């Protein structure tokens, strides 16, 4: 499907990164307004808070619902910030639109259900509000793209996505595994859709937000949505992953925003070498990884992002055509070279972490 997309136009400038911040959930009028003023004073222009909070298990705080919408209206009136919240049902959409909420997002637990997404798409038909779609909680790119298409078929053109990581039985370091190869493939297939990273949910811990945010910027993502609370230790939900506004400001100040499109003759030459090596991938895989690390060092020294969307798209399409000519299944070729590219990205991220 050919998507019809318009710019989100969420801020006065299109400078990377787009920043959205606020508490996990709207707990009280005082908490919402205090946090919003602190964030506004730090230069944040878009305030987020969960009004309806879908939780994994019952018995947890699930939001105040419509009672909290006037608090969001007050944030707009007092700070001039745009406000955003999650919706999961047509009733949520109706109430949020009536309250003048500026931006809506669809959560990971909703994205997994095509019936729920279609109901939301139907309820949004005829509106021009920006909609952000979180990845499904399980690593299923087609399901994510399906949700995007359903909204777009309903006439919603101001669309973006939120990469918040994927559920895994073995959590290891992160609360939700980044699986960067999935949003990278999404960018290849839908080049114009903005991708916003959610390091708060991905990491699940304050100390992981900064490195995950830097990785997202190094991969050329368009923005960050980060949870911030005036008193995070006493937050009613997801306390461990929320930053104070002052800590958020310090973290954002430490980010290095690299050039997304810079290219040189030298790096083009190295990439041509990689193309030649791919034809003999089994025998010389070790050599390929060494050259990838050489590229990573060059990018690091010249303030360049790790991921180049146009380069990746051209590589996949060319190898698919070559495989088809030789009688090899296109999906098989795509999967192999997706894995190879993911390993190259992982090596360069690890190189920067070192």
Image (cartoon, helix red, strand yellow):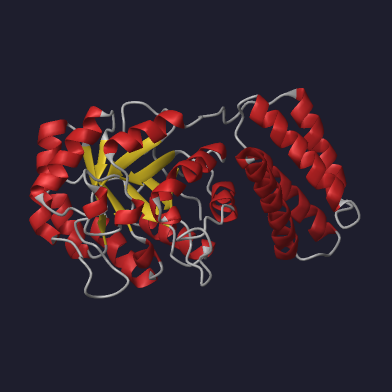
Please indicate, yes or no, whether residue 4 appears anywhere in the rendered image: no
The spot of residue 69 in percent (x, y) is 12, 51
- In the picture, measured across the screen, residue 273 lies left or right of residue 35, that is right
Rendered view: 256 above or below 335: above
Query: Where is the C terminus found, in terms of image quarters?
Result: top right
Q: Nearer the viewer, residue 328 or 354?
A: 354
Q: Residue at x 23, y 69 (%)?
A: 60
Q: Residue at x 79, y 46 (%)?
A: 289
User: Residue 109 occupies which quadrant of the picture?
Assistant: bottom left
Please indicate, yes or no, whether residue 354 appears anywhere in the rendered image: yes
The spot of residue 331 in percent (x, y) is 70, 64
Q: Nearer the viewer, residue 330 or 241?
A: 241
Rendered view: 166 above or below 98: below
The spot of residue 351 in percent (x, y) is 67, 41
Picture mark count: 0
User: Residue 21 occupies which quadrant of the picture?
Assistant: top left
- In the picture, measured across the screen, residue 170 lies left or right of residue 124, that is right
- In the picture, measured across the screen, residue 9 lies left or right of residue 290, that is left
Q: Residue at x 34, y 60 (%)?
A: 107
Residue at the front extreme of this rendering: 233
The spot of residue 292 in percent (x, y) is 76, 41
Q: Residue at x 34, y 66 (%)?
A: 110
């Amino acid at each position: 499907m050919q998507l019809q997309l318009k710019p989100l136009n969420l801020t006065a400038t299109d400078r990377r990164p787009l920043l959205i911040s606020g508490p996990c959930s709207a707990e009280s009028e005082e908490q919402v307004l205090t946090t919003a003023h602190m964030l506004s004073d730090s230069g944040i222009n878009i305030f987020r808070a969960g009004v309806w909070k879908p939780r994994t298990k019952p018995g947890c705080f699930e939001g105040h619902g419509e009672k909290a919408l006037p608090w969001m209206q007050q944030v707009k009136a007092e700070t001039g910030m745009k406000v955003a919240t999650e919706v999961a049902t047509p009733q949520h959409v109706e109430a949020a639109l009536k309250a003048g909420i500026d931006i809506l997002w669809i959560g990971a637990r909703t994205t997994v259900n095509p019936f729920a997404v279609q109901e939301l798409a139907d309820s949004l038909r005829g509106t021009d509000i920006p909609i952000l779609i979180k990845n499904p909680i399980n690593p299923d790119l087609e399901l994510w793209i399906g949700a995007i298409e359903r909204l777009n078929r309903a006439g919603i053109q101001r669309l973006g996505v939120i990469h918040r990581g994927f559920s895994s039985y073995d959590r290891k370091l992160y609360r939700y595994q980044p699986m960067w190869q999935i949003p990278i493939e999404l960018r290849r297939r839908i080049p114009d859709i903005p991708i916003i990273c959610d390091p708060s949910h991905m990491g699940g811990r304050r100390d992981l937000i900064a490195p995950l945010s830097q990785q997202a910027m190094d991969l050329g993502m368009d923005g960050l949505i980060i949870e911030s609370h005036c008193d995070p230790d006493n937050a009613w939900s997801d306390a461990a992953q929320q930053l104070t506004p002052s800590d958020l400001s310090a973290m954002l100040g430490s980010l290095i925003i690299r050039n997304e499109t810079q290219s040189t003759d030298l790096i083009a030459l190295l990439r041509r070498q990689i193309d030649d090596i791919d034809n003999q991938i089994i025998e010389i895989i070790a050599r390929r990884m060494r050259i990838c690390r050489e590229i990573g060092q060059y990018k690091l020294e010249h303030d360049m992002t790790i991921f180049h969307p146009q380069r990746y798209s051209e590589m996949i399409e060319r190898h698919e055509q070559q495989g088809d000519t030789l009688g090899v299944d296109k999906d098989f070729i795509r999967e192999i070279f997706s894995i190879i590219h993911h390993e190259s990205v992982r090596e360069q991220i690890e190189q920067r972490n070192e």
